[in-house]
Amino acid sequence: MARIRFVALKDLFPPKPKERKQSPRQLAAMKREAEYEKAIAKLTDGMVVVIEPTDERISTIRNSLARVINRNERATHLHYAIKSGVGYVSLEPIPGSRGGRKKRVQQTQ
């Protein structure tokens, strides 16, 4: 025979997670990405946003830029590159960066 119990409806749902304070690393990432988003929002045709590292590493800039660009509504039109330790973001292809058209090899006959 089955056991029958009555339980309050609120007991069936798991408790809501507590709001936790963000770590200093998370706060720094949010601040950095907010700065990048502001700069990209001001971007117009013919302009390039240049991001020079001050105290962060190149890999940090690259990862932050990738996250910001993927969240941006103009992501399909944005181009970014890291060249010589400096980050560039533009609405047009960046000269000298990877991912350009392949050069045709002339066939000799």
Image (tube, helix red, strand yellow):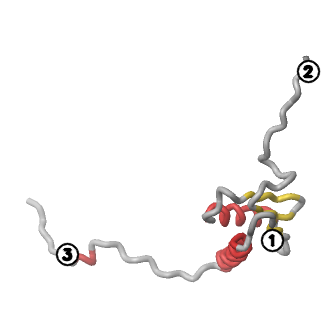
Q: Residues within 10 Å of mark 1 (few under 14, many from 20)?
A: few
Of 78 and 68, which appears nearest the observer?
Answer: 78
Please say if 76 is above or below 72: above
Most extreme residue toward the left, as rendered? Answer: 1
For marks 2 and 3, give the one nearer the viewer: 2
The residue beneath circle 1 is 56
Can residue 25 be seen? no
Residue that protrudes farthest toward the top in the picture: 109
Separation of residues labelled 3 and 1 (CA atoms)? 54 Å
Local crowd size for mark 2, using a 10 Å CA cut-off: few (<14), some (14–19), many (≥20): few
Judging depth in this view, the residue of 23 and 37 nearest the camera is 37
User: Sequence order check: which comes first, mark 2 or mark 1?
Assistant: 1
- Give, as a three-letter code, the residue at label 1: Glu
Task: Indicate the quadrant where residue 78 lies.
Answer: bottom right
Q: Which residue is mark 2?
A: 108
Res 84 quadrant in image: bottom right
User: Left or right: where does residue 86 sit relative to residue 4?
Assistant: right
Q: Amino acid at mark 2?
A: Thr
- Regarding residue 96, the answer to whether it shows in the image is yes
Residue 66 placement: quadrant: bottom right
